[in-house]
Amino acid sequence: MLATISSAVVDGIDGLCITIEVINTGTGTPRFTVVGLPDTTIRESRDRVRAALMSSGYKWPSTLPLTVNLAPSDVRKHGAGLDLPLALGVLVASKQLEQADVAGVAAVGELGLDGSIRRVPGLVSLAEAMSHATSASGDGAELVVPLDGASEAAIVAPGRVRGADRLRDLVEGLRGEGPLPALIEAPAVRSHDASRPELGDVRGQPLARWALEVAAAGGHHALMVGPPGAGKTMLASRLSALLPPLDAADAMTVARIHSAAGLRQDGSGLDLRPPFRAPHHGMSSVALIGGGTSSIRPGEISNAHGGVLFLDELGEFPRSVIDAMRQPLEEGVVRISRAHGAQVIPSRFQLVAASNPCPCGNGWTDGTCRCSEAQRRTYAMRFSDPLLDRFDIRIEVSPPEPRALLGRSSEEATADVAPRVAAARQLARSRGVRSNAELTASQLEASVPLSDAARLLLERELLSGSLTARGFARVWRVARTVADLAGAPEHIQPEHVQAALLLRIRVGALLGAPA
Amino acid sequence: MNDAELHALITLMSLKHAGPRRLRALLALATGEEVVDSLRNRRRPRAAEDPSEIAVSISSAVWEGWFNEVRAKADGVDLDAHRSSGGQILHPEHPAWPFVDDPDPPVLAFVRGSAELLERRPCVAIVGTRRCTSVGRHVAEEIGRQLAEAGVSVVSGLALGVDAAAHRGALSVGGAAIGVVASGLDVVYPASNRALWEAVAVSGLLLSEVPMGQRPTKWRFPARNRMIAALSDLVVVVESHAKGGALSTVDEANDRGVAVVVVPGSTRSSASDGTNALLIDGAIPVRDAADVLDVLGYAAPKDREPTQTRLEIPLGIEGDPKQLVLDAIASGPVHIDRLIELLGVSPPAAAATIKELSVSGDVVMDGHVVSRSQALMRDRLDRAEPSR
């Protein structure tokens, strides 16, 4: 008796539809062999399936010679998500269930020893893969997924997803002996709402608030340096709220990444809010970039895709971790190569970093610094120039005046600033890029004109040595964003360049000691 | 002085614990060659066998150390190394010997660069803490630059912070910089000052009493400070912590009757604790190079207007945003946030104003902290021009 069940596995963030065949070969010694490049979790699956079948009141066919094939057989497969289809296949092969009962079904889910069906990561990608495969064959299959997490699957296949909680209930439903779990509709789309971080909560600090607005409008990476208590984390968290909502395609990519990383909240629908990720500096480079030994999981830079990656205490991150981020910063995707193939995971994020000016945190401008010269130098050495050069915006954040903290906030709210940001992003799209930060050098020359006076100013900075060649283009881009926000449509004027220069101060003035 | 004697003296100067006082005491009784010879034979120089004969005490452990050291050190001394790449060995009979009548002169002085700078007057030392504030750094650099422009040689210790800033200022206008250091002239300390060190050697003068190849030991720094005081006509202290090394230069200057002037600092800045204490003790306060030149006697104090010269610069009408900014930073450095609030305009507009002031050199930006530049009025400097 041959049983065929559709299912899927996930690697990186891509789902792959697979077919599970279970056959009772009829002759030979009793056995349970799995072929088709399974990994350890799948080999162990036999014990989970046997326990789940027995505690659900079904028989484990211990006298039958069973062979399980996972097709296509040339791709490595991992994850406990194949427990459920494997159990269904064994039931069919041992004639406890009809093949016809499972013909229109693709299933994925991990089994508990008590017969419960557990959530697996990557349900968005899994559902996507399963729905493509089954609709291609034209039979309009239904997707059976764990009830916990079924809303994720419903994002890609609304109305075709059934969330199953227990193996016994599912099998009875398939046999027609009881009701099948209900079909689940697409959960409501989430966008910016009242819970978003409020820019109006930031008191005083006009420079930082303005820098944040420019960063949001132009997609510029930003570095904030300031003493503890200057509100750097608070500012950074406001940035994602200023960004325009994701478009549907980006939101779907984010959903796939977050689902594979196990970040999604149950019951939530497609989320148009740009993500904000703030990983701790103790993390490994695999956790930041993504990877893993058998299966590849997205890292924090992919979790921040479409949104903001905030690295607090940039100087505390190991150099290797930071340097690993440079290629994804450049390309917007992270490439993870393994012996059995490479994975490309989207990681287009806006980097916001914060740092104390020196180990003691006080900085040397007011003479309260307790660090020795050598300590400051060692500290400054942790920031590689190529990394620092990537920050279009580099500002020094001062703690707000005590006066500004008292009384009612009179500052502009997120709702005041966000429309200006959206308008600037619209202008960037008219130049053929998502944001000004993506403008290439040739695009700048061709379609982002400088007024003569502005060009002169910029060239003078370059010649005086206070600007590198790369910095030249970066200031140009930021100046365009400043001009966009100021409603200057045509040429960039000197005041825009001056503003951009002011937003990108010399690194030596920020970190370590300039001697 | 012949090479054999120089060789012997350098050998002695290379010994551990052989400070200038001890060496002078020994050399008052015998020549360098004689001292080396007896040490080589594991004997104290004859005159020193009776401890009462020399003014400073030398323990027997130190003598023992010298007996062991002297052979190896003598073989290691290379006079040519001290004379290569513009180097010279100065001795008390040398015409450029700068320590005539000094109470605590070195035995020899090793120099690189233009030794004739030692004969040029006036020389002003600018000293201060290695851990200076950005204000201190700017002040030291500006005073160094303006003194150099006025033809004054700037003496300092080539340490980090104030020392380096002062020399940088002097060199930026091609002025005369004299760096007095605590290590051999071929041992750059601190290593991060290498570029500045070389620049001083090329266009100014490096001076040390430490033979080539030797790293600085702790006692060498106060010893270096005494030479800074000895070479200078005036010592300017820019910033010093309460127990800073710069204060030892002040003590040495007082011992030699060299005047000490002090740049006042904020009472809330620990980097000014030492300097403000000096002011309480009666040191003369100075604000800038013109004040320093006044003290040196190059400009009559009565020429000076008691009002703030800063305000005489025609910068604009009342209520002009630039003037507002300049007024706001008159009492000290201010973060740009405060200025944006003060101007009451949008951040980009305020940024343009401030950046313009920085381009024109009226303000100095350190990160996002704005302070006023101490660009002196041209005519004050002209009036203060010393005769050369």
Image (cartoon, coloured by chain):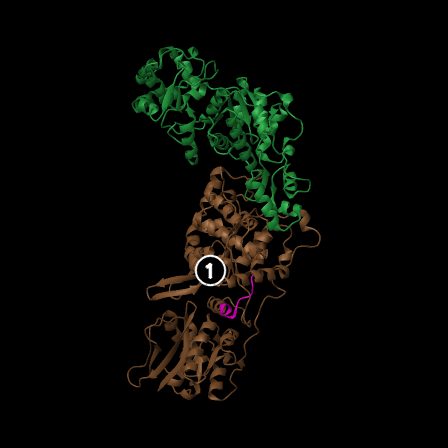
Q: Residue at x 66, y 26 (%)?
A: B305
Residue B334: image location, x then y, percent: 61, 41
Subunit under mark 1: A
- Left or right: where B129 falls relative to A44: right
- Name the residue at the right extreme: A407
> To which residue does mark 1 refer?
A301
Magenta span covers which residues?
Answer: A243-251
- Judging depth in this view, the residue of A227 and B11 nearest the camera is A227
Chain appearing in green on the rendered image: B
Q: Is residue A333 above or below residue A124?
A: above
Q: Colour of chain A?
A: brown
Mark 1 lies on a secondary structure that is helix
- Residue B149, horizontal then vertical, whole percent: 51, 27
- At a point 49% along the width and 44% down the height, the residue shown is A461
Query: Do we see residue A245 in this rendering?
Result: yes
Amino acid on which the number 1 mark rests in the picture: Ile
Q: Is residue B200 magenta?
A: no
Q: Can residue B43 be seen by looking at this rendering?
A: no
- Res B59 → quadrant: top left
A396 or A111: nearer the eye? A396
Relative to A385, is B15 above or below? above
Q: Position of residue A477 (x, y in %)?
A: 50, 54
